[in-house]
Image (cartoon, rainbow, N blue to C red):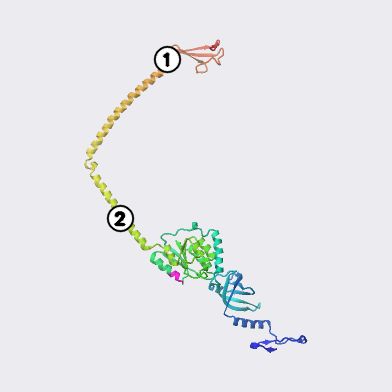
Amino acid sequence: MSRGPAGYRVAMATTASDDRRDPPADAMSVSEITRRVKEQLETRFADVWVAGEITNLTRASSGHIYLALKDETALLRGVVWRSAVPLLAIEPADGLAVVCHGRLEVYAPRGTYQLTIDRLHAIGTGALEERLRRLHAALAGEGLFDPGRKRMLPPFPRRIALITSPTGAAIADFLRTLQGRWPRAEVVVVPSRVQGAGAAEELAAALATAGRLRPAVDVIALVRGGGSLEDLWAFNEEVLVRAVAASPIPVVAGVGHEIDVTLADLVADVRALTPTDAAVRIAPDGRQVAADLASLAERLRNGLARRVRQARDRVESLGRSRMLVDPARLIGDRREVLGQHGRRLHRLTAAALERGRERVAAAAARLEAGSPLHLLARGWSVTCRESEPLALRSIAGLEPGDPLVTRLADGSVSSRVVSITPIPPRT
């Protein structure tokens, strides 16, 4: 046994002839060598940056994230403790090329080591943009970005929910603009992180909270300041996009600068270019509203004055009319007209009655000429069966012995059929 570098004891290899010797009494235990490896690794690699591709990512129920970083030839296991998750710049995902900061730690019970990660950034934007394209295509296929599902904003909001970071510049820009345009609106701030791992879930929860507020809000503003694609990545996460689409309250998204477009912007009912623009789109210009109201009030006053003048002119005109100036004369005129109509009606009625009497007399004469009684008086008679009052028109159906009744002008005669003689047809 000899001393190696840094004073470590090193057991030298023996020759074959020495294999039968007893092992040295001072051999290191597993725990001791693991402890020494742990001291060396954790001291030397206490502050490292490691680049690689994320694989085998697992989220534990405790909130910790377990993953591995790989390159062409090696694999390094890593962990993000729950307390460090909010510090990550983006949400980690399998296949994402990243650079991580952390320290190496040895887990003695298993004799393994891992990278404990406290910061994580995407390498470039290619991988993020590819993820964004795939998610955009999938959500567009579901119709989440269709213009037909967008809702109108209330013209005069009384209560506004503002979802953003309470310490960012976006909240100041939004409130300052809103105060200048529509100070009567009440703003309820629902605080949330707007960047980093877990921010999308926190923003989605804030949206749900805003939808449950009582009294209910009229509109929800989802805002944050500008940044890189990585900084704004939380607003491209599927969980937040679906939460915006499911919101029962209209949502205005004002994320980043004018050139920044996130999936949350596309699914929102209104996309604002900036947080300031979000306030402009939500709130009317109070000064313009006041000017419009003043103009309407002036039009109302002018309209009422015009109606009063018209009514006064009409009353004055009625006051000068004959009906009010000389009502007795007007009544006399109306009485004279009524008398004329009465006399005319009397003449027309008398003429109509005379014409009616003439028509009745003519009809009576025609009836008298065609009356059966008149024919009987001239020597005609009507014969019918004793059992049937209808006049006989033919010998058909008669039999000798049938009782008959013959009607004359001054009475009737009963008889029976003795014989029946048909009249031969004319040739």
Q: Position of residue 391 (x, y in %)?
A: 50, 17
The chief SS type of the magenta part is helix
> Is residue 205 highlighted in magenta?
no
Q: Is residue 235 above or below residue 401?
A: below
The three-letter code of the residue at mark 1 reads His
Q: Is residue 58 above or below residue 14?
A: above
Q: Is residue 23 left or right of residue 400?
A: right
Q: Position of residue 82 (x, y in %)?
A: 56, 73
User: Where, quadrant-wise, is the C terminus in this rendering?
Assistant: top right
The three-letter code of the residue at mark 2 reads Arg
Q: Position of residue 2 (x, y in %)?
A: 69, 89
Residue 177 in view:
yes
- Front one among 416 and 163: 163
Q: Is residue 65 left or right of residue 24?
A: left
Residue 217 in view:
no
SS at badge 1: helix
The tag earlier along the polypeptide, 1 or 2, is 2
The circle drawn on residue 301 is: 2
Q: Is residue 264 above or below residue 321?
A: below
- Front one among 81 and 102: 102
Q: Nearer the viewer, mark 1 or mark 2?
A: 2
Spot the residue most to the bottom. 2
Tally of marks: 2
Q: Please state the extent of the stretch shown in magenta in the rendering.
A: 168-172
- Front one among 323 and 279: 279
The circle drawn on residue 75 is: none
Residue pointed to by mark 1:
374
SS at badge 2: helix
